[in-house]
Amino acid sequence: MHANMRNPMSFLHKSLLGYRSLNCASSRRHISTLVISEHEGGSLKGSSLNALAAASLLGEKNSVSLLVAGSSSESLESVAKQAFSSCPFISQVLVAESDKLKHPLAEAWAELILLAQQQGKYTHVMAASTSFGKNVLPRAAALLNVSPISDVVKVMDERTFVRPIYAGNALSTVKYKGNEPCLVTVRPTSFPVDTSDSVNCASSPACPVTTLDVTDLNSEIIDKSTWLGQVSQQSERPDLGSAKVVISGGRALKSKENFKMLELLADKMGGAVGATRAAVDAGYVPNDMQVGQTGKIVAPQLYVAIGVSGAIQHLAGMKDSKVIVAINKDPDAPIFQVADYGLAGDLFEIIPELLEKLPEKKQ
Ligand SMILES: Cc1cc2nc3c(=O)[nH]c(=O)nc-3n(C[C@H](O)[C@H](O)[C@H](O)COP(=O)(O)OP(=O)(O)OC[C@H]3O[C@@H](n4cnc5c(N)ncnc54)[C@H](O)[C@@H]3O)c2cc1C
């Protein structure tokens, strides 16, 4: 199945079209949504904007609150302002500042969501389906005694969501019954962001920031886990999850050194490098480069799969890419079934030729 499940609608006027497609009864109900943000170095992560885009599709009468939390050393106010200028439909930004929230530990953040939910009585709590969101939201759902719906790719109406199952081979429509809050993680690539609706920070109205009192955070539970450290790859290349071009390699690359060819190709094309699980397991690349069911979900404008067989678990992570190019020496490789363009041949001949012919990327 190669259905493009991405919702073509985006912020504001486009999402208003989405409101109209909701049934009248649901659109009359008041909805209040708490979106859990992620930020790094004083900047809101793109995936949080995708979560906000999803929240904007829930209904006409939806007041959207964004939760921005972290330690006192972080510039939470600037994250709040940035969020508000990107998404002027945000009704309020809830800022929670505590050293207990310095690290993305599920124990602390789930307690925070519980606290915010007890105070705000939101009808919906949403987060992006990132490692953080997938870690935190189910725990918060357990604390609230509701069942979360994960990896949503489409909002049907305020309580009905579509999510992939069986490694993306089928879509399941799930509806919340009763009046419990809906706790949902959304797949970022399914809710694109249209930045044309963003407003200039300087000219935008004052960002409505409310401080959330976190003195009641349950230390007994939070102290059960300790942050040991974080190892992240420093790279000039775009982030794999949001890159417009992704060059992915498989086991056929045979070594870490050979993966450098893909890095050169990615640099020439302004893209990110991804990999199959087989390439990760073989130690050619770190596991944060894995694309697929148990890796990252990507949907770039161009996905180039090199020496990748096209196993179902890999396809689950990239089949929504706009244009797929496959290079494989086996003309019967399953990857060709989802490829828009296929090159049957030896990657060790094709890649050097491509590198030679492609112009250097303009700075
Ligand atoms: C529960 C579970 C979860 C999984 N999650 C993921 C996941 O998230 N992501 C993922 O990728 N996989 C995942 N897998 C593994 C998946 O099933 C495949 O094993 C894996 O994707 C295969 O990787 P590959 O295509 O690199 O290797 P292979 O299957 O070995 O394919 C290599 C391909 O390279 C081609 N080739 C060989 N030499 C050359 C050459 N010189 N030039 C051109 N082509 C060449 C071959 O024809 C072949 O098609 C998961 C598996 C399980 C069971």
Image: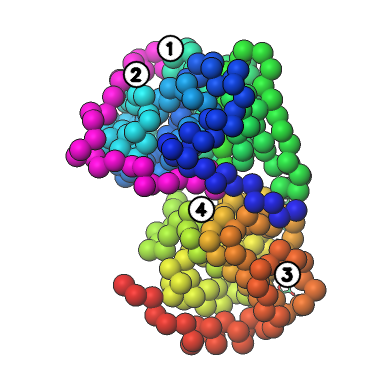
> Which label's residue is closer to the chain start, 1 or 3?
1
Q: Which residue is mark 4?
A: 241
Q: Which residues are magenta?
A: 189-218
Residue sitting at x 37%, y 29%: 90
Residue 154 is drawn in which quadrant? top right
> Which label's residue is closer to the chain start, 2 or 1?
1
**What's the CA distance linking mark 4 and mark 2?**
31 Å
- Seen as rendered, the residue at the extreme left is 202
What amino acid is labelled 3 in the image?
Phe
Q: Residues within 10 Å of mark 2 (few under 14, many from 20)?
A: some
Q: Of the numbered discs in the image, which one, if any, rests on residue 119?
A: 1
Residue sitting at x 40%, y 59%: 234
Q: Are marks 2 and 1 in contact (CB under 8 Å)?
A: yes
Q: Locate residue 3 relative to residue 209 in the image: left or right.
A: right
SS class, disc 3: helix
Q: Which residue is mark 2?
A: 212
Q: Locate residue 288 relative to residue 120 in the image: left or right.
A: right
> Which label's residue is closer to the chain start, 4 or 3?
4
Q: Is residue 179 above or below residue 134?
A: above
Image x and y of residue 131, in percent: 54, 42
What amino acid is labelled 4 in the image?
Gly
Q: Which residue is mark 3?
A: 336
Is residue 95 magenta-colored? no
